[in-house]
Image (spheres, rainbow, N blue to C red):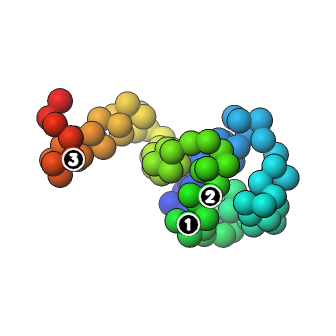
Amino acid sequence: MDFNEAVGLAVQVLRRHKGLTQKDFLGTVSIQYLSDLECGKRTASLAVLARICERLGVHEALLVILAKHFMHPTDPLPQIMREIERQLCVAGFMEAY
């Protein structure tokens, strides 16, 4: 699975988890756009993904983290989160843990 497909799957999983339909995103994106995104037929810009995340009520980073997990399902989410924290520390954005 490539990154765009994984992002689409993450959007779909989060949307369904929140109990939302594709119609609930009218005014954010069209039903066809969302359908194409969820099926991996379309690549969304960061601005569009930010609007989708706002409608979902989730942080934009969550979408990317889930996409990464879907691309490499054998990597446990806690391991991915620890690696993100480590990289933030190395970059000086967080105190060492």
Residue of label 1? 47
Q: Earlier in the sequence, mark 3 or mark 1?
A: 1
Is residue 48 in view? yes
Residue beneath disc 2: 51
Q: Amino acid at mark 3?
A: Phe
Disc nearer the start of the sequence (3/2): 2
State the separation of the CA atoms marked 3 and 2. Answer: 25 Å
The image quarter containing residue 17 is: top right
Image coords of residue 60 (percent x, y): 50, 50
Q: Nearer the viewer, residue 2 or 53?
A: 53
The local secondary structure at tag 3 comes to: loop
Residue 86, percent from left and from top: 22, 41
Considering only vertical position in the picture, is 96 above or below 91?
Answer: above
Residue sitting at x 21%, y 47%: 93
Residue pictured at 77% horizontal, 54% vertical: 25
- Residue 53 drawn above or below residue 79: below
Label pair 1/2, CB-CB below 8 angstroms? yes
